[in-house]
Amino acid sequence: MSGKSEFKADFSINASKKMLYPYIFSASGLAQWMADDVTIDEDKVFDFIWDEESHKARMVAHRLNSYVRFEFLPETEEDEDDPSYMELRLEMNELTQSVFLLVTDYSDINDSEESMELWTSLVDTLKEIVGG
């Protein structure tokens, strides 16, 4: 049985999908708000650095100005069968014209309150950057 759980949340951001997309798609954009640093190597493997720890991930899906999904490379045998992933999706509410960042975080963090605090803090940083 896996010790992983899925966390989902959405955050309203006062910016266009087109403006936000580079911040969820590119290593340089992600490095500005999500991690201490994010680099990408010649094999297109993203390296997320959190607290001086490296977490490598591959972008397994994306659609321009819409969403991106990263699957983390297995660190243990258990991860081989059940890899952690993170999906960042930009959606617009047609009625209010509000843009939302929908976060899906499938990882070892089983505390939804802790995940909410973490993502709220990250998204607040993103909002400061884009002025949203």
Image: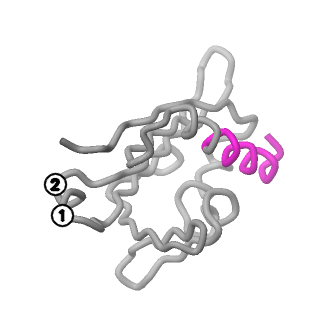
In terms of depth relative to the viewer, which is nearer, 26 or 128?
A: 128
Residue 5 image point, x, y percent: 35, 38
Name which residue lies at 22% across and 51% down. 82
- Magenta-tinted stretch: 119-132
x, y percentage for residue 118? Answer: 62, 44
Image vertical order of residue 49 relative to residue 112, above or below: below
Residue 132 rendering spot, x and y as whole percentages? 79, 40
* Horizontal side, residue 28 vs residue 76: left or right: right
Q: Secondary structure at mark 1?
A: helix
Point out which mark residue 17 bears: none
The residue wearing badge 2 is 81
CB atoms of marks 2 and 1 within 8 Å: yes
Rendered view: 43 above or below 26: below
Residue 26, picture quadrant: bottom right
At 54% from the left and 40% from the top, the residue drawn is 115
Amino acid carrying mark 1 in the image: Glu
Magenta segment, principal secondary structure?
helix
Q: Position of residue 124 (x, y in %)?
A: 74, 43
Residue at (70% x, 44% y) in the render: 121
* Circle 1 Cα neighbour tier, 10 Å, few/some/many (<14 / 14–19 / ≥20): few
Task: Please tell me which residue lies in front, 36 or 76.
Answer: 76
Is disc 2 placed on a helix, strand or loop? helix
Per the rendering, the mark at residue 77 is: 1
In this picture, residue 110 sits left or right of residue 100? left
Q: Relative to residue 96, is residue 19 depicted above or below?
A: below
As drawn, the residue found furthest toward the top would be 95
Q: Quadrant of residue 29?
A: bottom right
Whether 14 is among the magenta residues is: no
The mark lying in front, picked from 2 and 1, is 1
Which amino acid lies under the numbered mark 2 shown in the image of this protein?
A: Asp
Q: Label 2 to label 1, Cα distance in Å?
A: 7 Å
